[in-house]
Amino acid sequence: MEYLVRFSQSHETFRRPELEALAVIEGINLDVVSYSLNSPFCTIRLPSSAAATRLIRRSILIQSIHELWGAGTTLSAVHDQVRATTTHLWPLYLSCSFKFTLDSYQGSRPAADKIRIINSFAYLGFAGPIVMRLPDEEFVLFEDWPWNSTPLGLADPTRYFFGRFLAVGARDELPRKLDLKRRRYISTTSMDAELALVTANLALAAPGKLMYDPFVGTGSFPLACAQFGALTFGSDIDGRSMRGDGKRRTLKGNFEQYELLGGLGGMFTADLTNSPVRRGVLGDGGDGMRGRVFDGIICDPPYGVREGLRVLGVRDPEKSPWVIPKGKEMYKQADFIPPRKPYSFLAMLDDILQFAAQTLVDDGRLSFWMPTANDQDQEMSVPTHPYLEIVSVCTQVFNKCMLRHVVAGDGKLTRTGSRRLITYRRLPDAKVDQEAVKAWEGGTPKHEGKTADELNPFRKAYFNGFESPGAE
Amino acid sequence: MKLLTLNFLSCAVKTCKTSPLSFPLHPKDAELAKDDVEPNPDLLTNILPRLDWSALRTTAAELGFPDLPETAPSPEELVEGGKTVQDLHELLMETQIVEGKLVCGCCGHEYAVREGIANFLLPSHLV
Ligand SMILES: C[S@@+](CC[C@H](N)C(=O)[O-])C[C@H]1O[C@@H](n2cnc3c(N)ncnc32)[C@H](O)[C@@H]1O
Ligand SMILES: [Zn+2]
């Protein structure tokens, strides 16, 4: 049967990837019949209504799902289809309580019109009581109006969908539960709850799975994954980001606040470029699991603006030769903080992909955020790795007011005001293209340079662009 | 940090990575804590193939836990439950390492654990 998905008209490019990820998580066969970025209405084919309800139960970007009884560009076309295909369903709803709702997207109608339209469905013959609050069944007629329809004085929408309401997603519940405004412990780079949850969906976080964030900060991603039942791990080069004030405002305190402590596996201080996580050997022809640990890796890596991107090491050993022997003497002291040097964001991306290829089980997913463009407004290419297949590329565009806010907060965005969430799937060794492996081994780019500016175009954009007087 | 985590972590020093002595790390002066966690057979089934069983036996023995059998239980045994499954659940999911050190058997480097968070940052001469 066909079903109507009622999306929220926001984060458009994330919606279809989320829907498809949910189908993988729930093990449901999904066929997308029609989908457009410009519309909140999407039609899909599913094995059953029970599957439909299950499919969207943890969706963040879907509002509701409906059994689709009829659709068309005119109301009479809808009636024709309802009469032609659903008469066998009508008796099921003969005596239950029910209500009819009109949901007009980008449009409105006078009350008298609404009543006339709803009454045009009288032939369904439902004889039960009409109940406005919590009826047994709700039937909805959706109208898809063109943009600006009211000022333009348009008489009719472009499309109609009629269906029986089945279920809502998690949109009203979970983003509110994990809202940063009410979270005990956050920092300027904590990931927005809605997007952290969407990321966890794309990475297929689920009960029994192990998820890891190598740039964990205050823990937004592990919290979202734990909310979906996963066991979570994380690390950060800056131990303070996890420890917080050492009392209530800590990463662990956040897990406590949401009663998710059972999903907290382990947090540790580490540099991704010198990680203690044990790794598998690429292409060892193993069983797709042994030697690899995680079902999913999700992160928001630092871009080198402000204090962000650093790795362990001495920037210029010739210029400061005393640093190394001093470290040798001091490193055993509890409060020793090892020196760090600037590093290139592009090299870090290569490191993340390699790490993911070596630690994800077959079909495990990597999802990470990165800016869309560099400081010359040139689009940055989506990084690739022969063991990782790109599943989806989603783009979040910032409106002006948000852009200003985010730049003031963590200074991480480029001038274009957008960033991407890229999701990969770990290919089983047997499916990896060996030619691509050779090309990649031969040509692994080296991103060299010494100062933070040389290494990171974003940092330059930030200081030269945003902070100059009069800049947006 | 759940003890399960120890099964995923080796010494961070690059030259140690190739040595079998760098994994598992050996707890020293470890202070442990125990939480009550609902048994989760699905989770155990999922992680069993990823565990390094002999490393896990070493960790269990070093921390004074009951001996684990020489070979890992089969998926069927996990579903059935029983003593090994209980021991595994207690060891991997319920036990936390809160304070102490994790020592590399290859280079001898000691990684400090404080408030449940292990520190794997290396001084420059080891990077
Ligand atoms: C954008 S923040 C991530 C914030 C996190 N998603 C949250 O919700 O709090 C990036 C983090 O990466 C850390 N970081 C920077 N360089 C690192 C490195 N080489 N290895 C590991 N973490 C690093 C920073 O300390 C910072 O906490
Ligand atoms: Zn070592």
Image (spheres, rainbow, N blue to C red):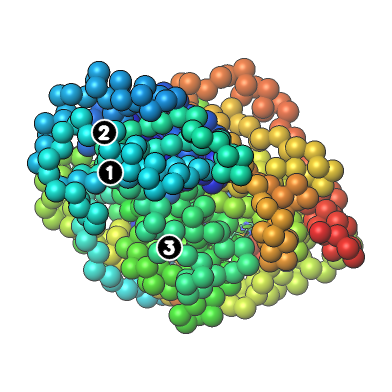
Tell me the quadrant of ligand 1: bottom right
- What's the distance in space between the residues labelled 2 and 1, CA to CA? 9 Å
> Where, by quadrant of the figure, is residue A311 drawn?
bottom right
Relative placement, left or right, of A192 versus A47 is: right
Q: Position of residue A269 (x, y in %)?
A: 55, 64
Q: Is residue B49 visible?
A: no
Pointer 3 or 2: first along the chain:
2
Read off the residue under disc 2: A121
- What's the distance in space between the residues labelled 1 and 3, CA to CA? 28 Å
Marks 3,2: beta carbons within 8 A: no
Pointer 1 or 3: first along the chain:
1
Read off the residue under disc 1: A100
Marks 2,1: beta carbons within 8 A: yes
Read off the residue under disc 3: A176
Mark 3 vs mark 2: give the one in front.
Answer: 2
Dots 3 and 2 on the same chain: yes
